[in-house]
Amino acid sequence: MKNILNNKLVMLVTVLVVGIAVGWLTKPDTAPNMEADEHDHVESIAGIPITYTCSMHPQIRQNEPGDCPICGMDLIPLENENAEADPMAITMSPTAMQLAGIQSLVVGNSSSDKSIRLNGKIQTDERQNYTQSAHISGRIENLTVNFTGEYVKKGQTLGQLYSPELATAQEELFQAQKIKDSQPALFAAAKSKLKNWKLTDGQIDQILATGKVTEQVPILANVSGYVTEKMVNLGDYVNRGEPIYQIADLSKVWVLFDVYESELQWINKGDEIEFTVQSLPGETFTGKVSYIDPMVNPQTRVAKARLELSNSNLKFKPEMFVSGKVESEGSSKDNSIVVPKTAVMWTGTRSVVYVKTATNQSVTFQLREVTLGPALGDHYQIESGLLPGEEIAVNGTFSIDAAAQLAGKPSMMSPDGGSAMSGHNHGGMAMPVSITSATANPEFISQDAKNVLKPLFDSYFELKDALTQDKLTASLNSARKMKSIISKVNMSKFKGESHMSWMKYENNLKTHLDKFVEQKSLDEVRKNFLNISDEMVSMAEKFHPYPSKIYVQHCPMADSNRGADWLSLQDKVVNPYFGPSMLSCGEVIKIID
């Protein structure tokens, strides 16, 4: 039995060995096909140019893998780069859009509502102002109302006036009284003469009853109100008709708001204004516009909008400061296209947006120039360039523009496109940049006007330098210096269109500088510096006021990757938005010569 089992085991092993040998000899030769497949696959990749980008900074484009020159992350192949339907549009993957914070909005017709902030003062009602004058020539013998602000009632005696003419007139009255039966007209004329001097019938009857000449006449108040100006002193000699007091009835007052000419179209008679008074905190008042000045003040470029208020409890006092807000539909009642301000990029001469087109394969953005209408708070009204139903980028537009510029496609500063770029100067890396010279539509101003603007730009450069060094106190001092310089600018130096332009820059800069000096941290200061820089860049492009070259520099990472500009006197980038932590981040995008 044992031998039989051993023989079966030997036979089983032999059959297994023979089967393996036969299988090896008869297997198909697949090695050449595998090599061919692998070769074909490599050929299909090599035949298509691969562009590598950074998922955090989609504006970076390179022809080979590596590290991002900004953040150091590994570059990844760009998705669907060759699938763009429009060669002038920039394609972005959903991942890149999400990382760049890009958001879009479908535009449509909406009402052109606008909220307008107004400042003004409480003033006396001009119809309630009166002048108390002398009705007869003479010397002031007594004054019972001796100071401004005192309340007087109608008929109250304000003082006594000595008048030789009054004595003569009384003698004539006594003589006429003796012959009044035969000459009644003469007696009536003598009484009328005294009445013309504002003596009452009671005073005249008293003079006739006593038969004595009165050399002093009382000065009686013609109206009730508060003395706003005292114009004589005891012992002064006054002529007939000469003013003695100014009296105002404060039971009604006016609120006069300053309305800039650019906002006049949004304020109409009958509009309701909600306002507060600085000296009455916690209280809110409302009133309707009863009158708007038909002319604009040539010096301040504002017109007055008037509210009329009842003031029986004297809560409102003349010269109190007030702040108001009006919600208005403006002069146009038709629906129009309204877009957020964050969607619009403004170069000083052009306004552009990025229109989004989405397909199953890709998402593209294409530059579109638009014509702006009036500003509506945080929105702009679009006059032309967009149609209802189109979708535009409203956040992350500077990231899209940076990617378009670096890809050589139409962008904000290069509307016709240009050569593709691989990046910009970060951390001292030399990157090719496209620099333009600002010469489009400048407004020529006199040398005197340039001279008054130069100190403003000098203080701006001081502010910028302070931020590059993280010096909070120095930056606040420079901002206060800018405010002081603006307040001293002689507007008469600006003629024609430049006068209107300067008024706009002056108003905007004052608003931004007021906010700037109130900040307590570098982060908040830098957010406000962005708005100041936008105005200064625009002014430099418009006026060319500086005697030397000014470099417009841009960093796409500033303002939460939305990008920001600033001015410098040197082409070397020294970034005020990040300071020492990222000092060389940015590039020169324009030269103002």
Image (cartoon, rainbow, N blue to C red):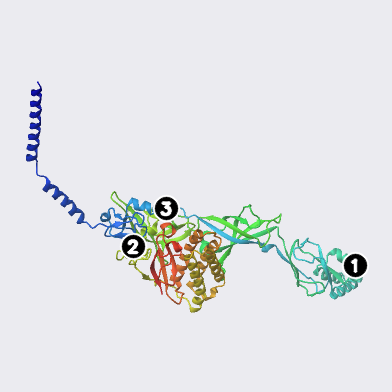
**Quadrant, the C terminus:** bottom left
Q: CA distance from mark 3 to mark 1?
A: 84 Å
Residue placed farthest to the bottom in the image?
447
Give the labeled residue for mark 2.
Answer: 423
Crowdedness near tag 2: few (<14), some (14–19) or many (≥20) residues, C-alpha within 10 Å: many
Which-is-in-front pick, marks 1 and 2? 2
Q: Could you tell whether 490 is left or right of 585 in the image?
A: right
Q: Position of residue 542 (x, y in %)?
A: 44, 71
Give the labeled residue for mark 1.
Answer: 208
Taking depth in this image into account, of 526 and 164 the one nearest to the observer is: 526
Crowdedness near tag 3: few (<14), some (14–19) or many (≥20) residues, C-alpha within 10 Å: some
Q: Which mark is residue 459?
A: none
Which image quadrant is residue 138 in? bottom right
Q: CA distance from mark 3 to mark 2?
A: 39 Å
Q: Could you tell whether 232 is left or right of 66 in the image?
A: right
Specify whether residue 389 is in view: no
Q: Position of residue 308 (x, y in %)?
A: 64, 58
Taking depth in this image into account, of 461 and 368 the one nearest to the observer is: 461
Specify whether residue 92 is in view: yes
Upstream in sequence: badge 3 or badge 1? 3
Q: Could you tell whether 47 is left or right of 76 in the image?
A: left
Which image quadrant is residue 145 in? bottom right
Residue drawn at the location 54% of the way across and 75% of the way down: 492
Give the labeled residue for mark 3.
Answer: 109
Upstream in sequence: badge 3 or badge 2? 3
Upstream in sequence: badge 1 or badge 2? 1
Circle 3: residue type: Asn
Question: Is disc 1 placed on a helix, strand or loop?
Answer: helix
Residue placed farthest to the front in the image?
2
**Quadrant, the N terminus:** top left
